[in-house]
Amino acid sequence: MQRYILYRIAAFPFLLLGVATISFLITHLTQADPLSSIISERQMNNPEVVAAAKARWGLDRSLPEQYVAYVRNLVTGDMGTSFRTKRPVLTDIAERLPATLELVFSAMIFGSLSGILLGVIAARYQGRPLDYAARFFAVLGAAVPVFWSGLLLLYLFSVKLGWIPGPGRLDARSSPPDFVTGMYTIDALIAGDFRAFGSALHHLLLPAFVLGWSVMGIISRLVRASMLDALGQDYIRAARAKGAGEVRVLMRHALPNAMIPTLTIIGYSFAYLITGAVLTETIFAWPGIGSYAVDSARTLDYPAIIGITLVGASAFLLASLATDVAYAFANPRIEFS
Protein backbone atom coordinates (compact mmCIF):
# COMPACT_ATOMS: atom_id res chain seq x y z
CA MET A 1 0.00 0.00 0.00
CA GLN A 2 2.73 2.49 0.90
CA ARG A 3 4.60 1.76 -2.32
CA TYR A 4 1.42 2.17 -4.32
CA ILE A 5 0.66 5.55 -2.70
CA LEU A 6 4.21 6.80 -3.28
CA TYR A 7 4.04 5.69 -6.92
CA ARG A 8 0.77 7.57 -7.44
CA ILE A 9 2.09 10.72 -5.75
CA ALA A 10 5.27 10.59 -7.85
CA ALA A 11 3.14 10.58 -11.00
CA PHE A 12 1.21 13.72 -9.99
CA PRO A 13 3.73 16.29 -11.34
CA PHE A 14 3.82 14.65 -14.77
CA LEU A 15 0.04 14.45 -14.98
CA LEU A 16 -0.31 18.09 -13.92
CA LEU A 17 2.28 19.09 -16.51
CA GLY A 18 0.16 17.40 -19.16
CA VAL A 19 -2.95 19.22 -17.94
CA ALA A 20 -1.07 22.53 -17.91
CA THR A 21 0.20 21.93 -21.45
CA ILE A 22 -3.25 21.17 -22.85
CA SER A 23 -4.80 24.14 -21.01
CA PHE A 24 -2.03 26.43 -22.23
CA LEU A 25 -2.53 25.41 -25.85
CA ILE A 26 -6.32 25.67 -25.72
CA THR A 27 -6.32 29.12 -24.13
CA HIS A 28 -3.64 30.50 -26.44
CA LEU A 29 -5.09 29.08 -29.65
CA THR A 30 -8.44 30.81 -29.25
CA GLN A 31 -9.31 33.69 -31.55
CA ALA A 32 -9.96 36.11 -28.69
CA ASP A 33 -7.37 38.75 -27.85
CA PRO A 34 -6.32 38.84 -24.17
CA LEU A 35 -5.18 42.44 -24.56
CA SER A 36 -8.82 43.50 -24.34
CA SER A 37 -8.73 42.56 -20.65
CA ILE A 38 -5.45 44.37 -20.03
CA ILE A 39 -5.86 47.74 -21.73
CA SER A 40 -8.93 49.83 -22.51
CA GLU A 41 -10.72 49.83 -25.85
CA ARG A 42 -9.50 53.36 -26.60
CA GLN A 43 -5.87 52.39 -25.97
CA MET A 44 -6.19 49.42 -28.32
CA ASN A 45 -5.85 51.91 -31.17
CA ASN A 46 -2.52 53.16 -29.84
CA PRO A 47 0.33 50.99 -31.27
CA GLU A 48 2.79 52.11 -28.59
CA VAL A 49 0.48 51.16 -25.73
CA VAL A 50 -0.32 47.81 -27.37
CA ALA A 51 3.38 47.04 -27.90
CA ALA A 52 4.22 47.98 -24.31
CA ALA A 53 1.41 45.79 -22.94
CA LYS A 54 2.53 42.83 -25.05
CA ALA A 55 6.11 43.24 -23.85
CA ARG A 56 4.97 43.62 -20.22
CA TRP A 57 2.96 40.40 -20.25
CA GLY A 58 5.20 38.43 -22.61
CA LEU A 59 2.59 38.30 -25.38
CA ASP A 60 5.09 39.51 -27.97
CA ARG A 61 6.94 36.20 -27.79
CA SER A 62 6.23 33.15 -29.90
CA LEU A 63 3.94 30.45 -28.50
CA PRO A 64 6.80 28.00 -27.76
CA GLU A 65 8.73 30.74 -25.93
CA GLN A 66 5.65 31.60 -23.84
CA TYR A 67 5.13 27.92 -23.02
CA VAL A 68 8.74 27.37 -21.92
CA ALA A 69 8.62 30.49 -19.75
CA TYR A 70 5.32 29.40 -18.19
CA VAL A 71 6.53 25.88 -17.40
CA ARG A 72 9.78 27.24 -15.97
CA ASN A 73 7.81 29.52 -13.63
CA LEU A 74 5.31 26.77 -12.81
CA VAL A 75 8.07 24.44 -11.62
CA THR A 76 9.08 27.08 -9.07
CA GLY A 77 5.47 27.44 -7.85
CA ASP A 78 4.69 30.58 -9.86
CA MET A 79 1.37 30.34 -11.74
CA GLY A 80 1.84 33.75 -13.28
CA THR A 81 0.12 37.07 -12.70
CA SER A 82 -3.57 37.61 -13.32
CA PHE A 83 -4.37 40.00 -16.17
CA ARG A 84 -7.48 41.16 -14.30
CA THR A 85 -6.38 41.54 -10.67
CA LYS A 86 -2.69 42.24 -11.41
CA ARG A 87 -1.80 39.89 -8.55
CA PRO A 88 -0.16 36.45 -8.50
CA VAL A 89 -2.68 33.79 -9.49
CA LEU A 90 -1.53 31.59 -6.61
CA THR A 91 -2.36 34.39 -4.16
CA ASP A 92 -5.84 34.85 -5.64
CA ILE A 93 -6.56 31.12 -5.50
CA ALA A 94 -5.20 30.78 -1.95
CA GLU A 95 -7.54 33.55 -0.79
CA ARG A 96 -10.62 32.08 -2.49
CA LEU A 97 -10.07 28.35 -2.05
CA PRO A 98 -11.07 28.21 1.66
CA ALA A 99 -14.50 29.66 0.84
CA THR A 100 -15.02 27.00 -1.83
CA LEU A 101 -13.78 24.22 0.46
CA GLU A 102 -16.15 25.34 3.21
CA LEU A 103 -19.07 25.23 0.78
CA VAL A 104 -18.03 21.91 -0.80
CA PHE A 105 -17.36 20.17 2.53
CA SER A 106 -20.79 21.23 3.80
CA ALA A 107 -22.49 20.19 0.57
CA MET A 108 -20.77 16.81 0.57
CA ILE A 109 -21.64 16.12 4.21
CA PHE A 110 -25.30 16.88 3.52
CA GLY A 111 -25.37 15.15 0.13
CA SER A 112 -23.56 12.01 1.28
CA LEU A 113 -25.44 11.46 4.55
CA SER A 114 -28.87 12.23 3.14
CA GLY A 115 -28.15 10.28 -0.05
CA ILE A 116 -27.08 7.18 1.89
CA LEU A 117 -30.11 7.47 4.19
CA LEU A 118 -32.55 7.84 1.30
CA GLY A 119 -30.91 4.96 -0.55
CA VAL A 120 -31.22 2.66 2.44
CA ILE A 121 -34.86 3.65 3.01
CA ALA A 122 -35.71 3.17 -0.66
CA ALA A 123 -34.10 -0.28 -0.72
CA ARG A 124 -35.71 -1.36 2.56
CA TYR A 125 -39.20 -0.34 1.41
CA GLN A 126 -38.83 -1.31 -2.24
CA GLY A 127 -42.03 -0.81 -4.21
CA ARG A 128 -43.75 1.05 -1.36
CA PRO A 129 -44.68 4.73 -1.03
CA LEU A 130 -41.48 5.54 0.91
CA ASP A 131 -39.42 4.09 -1.95
CA TYR A 132 -41.23 6.22 -4.54
CA ALA A 133 -40.97 9.36 -2.38
CA ALA A 134 -37.25 8.88 -1.74
CA ARG A 135 -36.54 8.21 -5.41
CA PHE A 136 -38.63 11.20 -6.53
CA PHE A 137 -36.77 13.58 -4.20
CA ALA A 138 -33.43 12.13 -5.30
CA VAL A 139 -34.21 12.31 -9.03
CA LEU A 140 -35.52 15.84 -8.59
CA GLY A 141 -32.25 16.95 -7.04
CA ALA A 142 -30.19 15.36 -9.80
CA ALA A 143 -32.41 16.58 -12.63
CA VAL A 144 -33.18 20.18 -11.66
CA PRO A 145 -30.47 22.62 -12.85
CA VAL A 146 -28.55 24.25 -10.02
CA PHE A 147 -29.16 27.75 -11.33
CA TRP A 148 -32.94 27.17 -11.31
CA SER A 149 -33.16 25.54 -7.88
CA GLY A 150 -30.74 28.09 -6.42
CA LEU A 151 -32.67 31.10 -7.70
CA LEU A 152 -36.03 29.58 -6.74
CA LEU A 153 -34.99 28.65 -3.19
CA LEU A 154 -33.21 31.97 -2.70
CA TYR A 155 -36.34 33.85 -3.78
CA LEU A 156 -38.61 31.70 -1.61
CA PHE A 157 -36.65 31.45 1.64
CA SER A 158 -34.78 34.75 1.52
CA VAL A 159 -37.01 37.23 -0.31
CA LYS A 160 -40.50 35.92 0.47
CA LEU A 161 -40.18 34.18 3.84
CA GLY A 162 -37.04 35.88 5.18
CA TRP A 163 -35.86 32.68 6.86
CA ILE A 164 -32.46 32.65 5.16
CA PRO A 165 -30.18 35.68 4.67
CA GLY A 166 -29.27 36.90 1.21
CA PRO A 167 -26.11 36.16 -0.77
CA GLY A 168 -22.66 36.43 0.80
CA ARG A 169 -20.79 34.70 3.61
CA LEU A 170 -21.66 37.00 6.53
CA ASP A 171 -24.22 39.57 7.60
CA ALA A 172 -23.36 43.18 6.88
CA ARG A 173 -22.94 43.88 10.61
CA SER A 174 -20.67 40.90 11.25
CA SER A 175 -16.90 41.04 10.89
CA PRO A 176 -14.91 38.08 9.55
CA PRO A 177 -13.11 36.12 12.27
CA ASP A 178 -9.33 36.12 12.46
CA PHE A 179 -7.84 34.08 9.63
CA VAL A 180 -6.79 30.54 10.59
CA THR A 181 -8.24 28.24 7.93
CA GLY A 182 -10.15 30.76 5.85
CA MET A 183 -13.39 28.91 6.60
CA TYR A 184 -15.55 31.32 8.55
CA THR A 185 -17.46 28.70 10.54
CA ILE A 186 -14.30 26.98 11.77
CA ASP A 187 -12.37 30.22 12.35
CA ALA A 188 -15.29 31.68 14.32
CA LEU A 189 -15.39 28.62 16.57
CA ILE A 190 -11.63 28.79 17.11
CA ALA A 191 -11.93 32.47 18.05
CA GLY A 192 -14.98 31.82 20.24
CA ASP A 193 -17.00 34.31 18.19
CA PHE A 194 -20.40 32.61 18.23
CA ARG A 195 -22.14 35.57 16.64
CA ALA A 196 -19.92 35.30 13.57
CA PHE A 197 -20.33 31.50 13.63
CA GLY A 198 -24.11 31.79 13.61
CA SER A 199 -24.02 34.31 10.79
CA ALA A 200 -21.61 32.22 8.71
CA LEU A 201 -23.61 29.03 9.30
CA HIS A 202 -26.86 30.79 8.43
CA HIS A 203 -25.43 32.00 5.12
CA LEU A 204 -23.96 28.57 4.40
CA LEU A 205 -27.15 26.52 4.78
CA LEU A 206 -28.92 27.33 1.51
CA PRO A 207 -25.98 27.18 -0.94
CA ALA A 208 -24.75 23.97 0.70
CA PHE A 209 -28.22 22.45 0.34
CA VAL A 210 -28.50 23.49 -3.32
CA LEU A 211 -25.05 22.14 -4.15
CA GLY A 212 -25.47 18.96 -2.10
CA TRP A 213 -28.91 18.19 -3.49
CA SER A 214 -27.55 17.18 -6.88
CA VAL A 215 -24.91 14.95 -5.26
CA MET A 216 -27.52 13.43 -2.97
CA GLY A 217 -29.58 12.30 -5.96
CA ILE A 218 -26.70 10.40 -7.53
CA ILE A 219 -25.56 8.81 -4.26
CA SER A 220 -29.03 7.72 -3.17
CA ARG A 221 -29.78 5.96 -6.46
CA LEU A 222 -26.45 4.14 -6.38
CA VAL A 223 -26.89 3.14 -2.72
CA ARG A 224 -30.40 1.86 -3.43
CA ALA A 225 -29.21 -0.30 -6.32
CA SER A 226 -26.24 -1.62 -4.33
CA MET A 227 -28.40 -2.29 -1.27
CA LEU A 228 -30.95 -4.23 -3.32
CA ASP A 229 -28.15 -6.36 -4.72
CA ALA A 230 -26.66 -6.91 -1.25
CA LEU A 231 -30.03 -7.77 0.33
CA GLY A 232 -30.43 -10.63 -2.11
CA GLN A 233 -27.17 -12.33 -1.12
CA ASP A 234 -26.89 -15.52 0.91
CA TYR A 235 -25.09 -13.90 3.86
CA ILE A 236 -28.08 -11.58 4.38
CA ARG A 237 -30.46 -14.53 4.47
CA ALA A 238 -28.10 -16.28 6.88
CA ALA A 239 -28.03 -13.23 9.17
CA ARG A 240 -31.81 -13.06 9.20
CA ALA A 241 -32.04 -16.81 9.85
CA LYS A 242 -29.82 -16.35 12.92
CA GLY A 243 -32.33 -13.85 14.30
CA ALA A 244 -30.51 -10.59 13.53
CA GLY A 245 -32.76 -7.55 13.66
CA GLU A 246 -33.62 -5.68 10.48
CA VAL A 247 -31.65 -2.60 11.48
CA ARG A 248 -28.57 -4.72 12.18
CA VAL A 249 -28.98 -6.55 8.87
CA LEU A 250 -29.21 -3.27 6.98
CA MET A 251 -26.51 -1.26 8.76
CA ARG A 252 -24.03 -3.98 9.76
CA HIS A 253 -24.21 -6.45 6.88
CA ALA A 254 -25.75 -4.87 3.76
CA LEU A 255 -24.64 -1.22 3.92
CA PRO A 256 -20.85 -1.79 4.27
CA ASN A 257 -20.85 -3.89 1.09
CA ALA A 258 -23.14 -1.45 -0.72
CA MET A 259 -20.80 1.42 0.17
CA ILE A 260 -17.85 0.07 -1.82
CA PRO A 261 -19.07 1.28 -5.24
CA THR A 262 -20.50 4.41 -3.61
CA LEU A 263 -17.05 5.52 -2.47
CA THR A 264 -16.10 6.26 -6.07
CA ILE A 265 -19.07 8.59 -6.57
CA ILE A 266 -18.44 10.38 -3.28
CA GLY A 267 -14.73 10.89 -4.04
CA TYR A 268 -15.20 12.17 -7.57
CA SER A 269 -18.23 14.28 -6.62
CA PHE A 270 -16.09 16.11 -4.08
CA ALA A 271 -13.39 16.74 -6.70
CA TYR A 272 -15.96 17.88 -9.25
CA LEU A 273 -17.58 20.34 -6.86
CA ILE A 274 -14.24 22.06 -6.18
CA THR A 275 -14.38 23.69 -9.60
CA GLY A 276 -17.96 22.76 -10.50
CA ALA A 277 -19.62 25.04 -7.95
CA VAL A 278 -19.54 27.90 -10.46
CA LEU A 279 -23.29 28.48 -10.71
CA THR A 280 -23.90 28.11 -6.98
CA GLU A 281 -21.14 30.57 -6.10
CA THR A 282 -22.38 33.02 -8.73
CA ILE A 283 -26.01 32.89 -7.55
CA PHE A 284 -25.14 33.24 -3.87
CA ALA A 285 -22.25 35.71 -4.40
CA TRP A 286 -19.91 33.23 -2.75
CA PRO A 287 -16.30 34.47 -3.17
CA GLY A 288 -14.73 31.12 -4.07
CA ILE A 289 -12.71 29.88 -7.01
CA GLY A 290 -15.91 29.13 -8.95
CA SER A 291 -16.82 32.81 -9.18
CA TYR A 292 -13.12 33.54 -9.77
CA ALA A 293 -13.23 31.17 -12.75
CA VAL A 294 -16.27 32.96 -14.18
CA ASP A 295 -14.64 36.38 -13.88
CA SER A 296 -11.41 35.03 -15.40
CA ALA A 297 -13.24 33.49 -18.36
CA ARG A 298 -15.14 36.72 -19.02
CA THR A 299 -11.91 38.73 -19.19
CA LEU A 300 -9.79 36.11 -21.01
CA ASP A 301 -7.45 35.94 -18.02
CA TYR A 302 -5.20 33.13 -19.32
CA PRO A 303 -2.96 32.68 -16.25
CA ALA A 304 -5.97 32.51 -13.93
CA ILE A 305 -7.83 30.07 -16.19
CA ILE A 306 -4.84 27.70 -16.33
CA GLY A 307 -4.31 28.04 -12.58
CA ILE A 308 -7.93 27.08 -11.84
CA THR A 309 -7.63 24.15 -14.22
CA LEU A 310 -4.59 22.91 -12.32
CA VAL A 311 -6.47 23.19 -9.03
CA GLY A 312 -9.31 21.12 -10.47
CA ALA A 313 -6.90 18.53 -11.85
CA SER A 314 -5.14 18.29 -8.48
CA ALA A 315 -8.49 17.77 -6.76
CA PHE A 316 -9.36 14.90 -9.10
CA LEU A 317 -5.96 13.26 -8.66
CA LEU A 318 -6.17 13.47 -4.87
CA ALA A 319 -9.77 12.25 -4.88
CA SER A 320 -8.80 9.29 -7.06
CA LEU A 321 -5.98 8.36 -4.69
CA ALA A 322 -8.15 8.78 -1.59
CA THR A 323 -10.89 6.64 -3.17
CA ASP A 324 -8.47 3.83 -3.97
CA VAL A 325 -7.10 3.88 -0.42
CA ALA A 326 -10.64 3.90 0.99
CA TYR A 327 -11.41 0.89 -1.21
CA ALA A 328 -8.60 -1.05 0.45
CA PHE A 329 -9.97 -0.31 3.92
CA ALA A 330 -13.56 -1.05 2.92
CA ASN A 331 -12.66 -4.29 1.19
CA PRO A 332 -9.37 -5.91 2.36
CA ARG A 333 -9.55 -8.38 -0.55
CA ILE A 334 -8.59 -5.60 -2.98
CA GLU A 335 -4.93 -5.68 -3.91
CA PHE A 336 -2.93 -2.98 -5.68
CA SER A 337 -0.40 -3.90 -8.31
Image: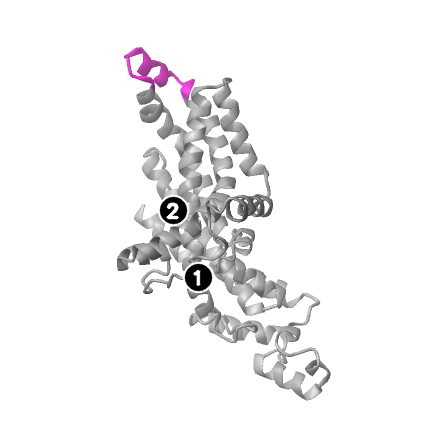
Q: Position of residue 289 (x, y in %)?
A: 49, 60
Vertical relation: 245 (above or below) 162:
above
- List the single residue furthest toward the top: 241
Tell me what residue is drawn at x 33 percent, y 24 percent.
253
Q: Give the range drawn in magenta.
A: 231-246
Which corner quadrant of the image does residue 46 belong to? bottom right
The residue type indicated by label 2 comes to: Ala
Instruction: Please name the residue that numbered disc 1 is placed on.
Output: 172
| Circle 1: element type | loop
The residue type indicated by label 1 comes to: Ala
Q: Which of 109 and 25 is in front in this view?
A: 109
Q: Residue 322 carries which label?
A: 2
- What colouring style does the render use? one colour
Residue 261 in sight here: no
Magenta part mainly helix, strand or loop?
helix
Which corner quadrant of the image does residue 173 belong to? bottom left
Q: Nearer the viewer, residue 330 or 95?
A: 95
Q: Does the magenta stretch include residue 234?
A: yes
Left or right: 35 as drawn, with respect to 179: right
Circle 2 residues within 10 Å: few <14, some 14–19, many ≥20 = some
Eye-nearest disc, 2 or 1: 1
| Circle 2: element type | helix
Left or right: 48 as drawn, with respect to 137: right
Q: Does the magenta stretch include residue 258?
A: no
Tell me what residue is drawn at x 70 percent, y 80 percent.
44
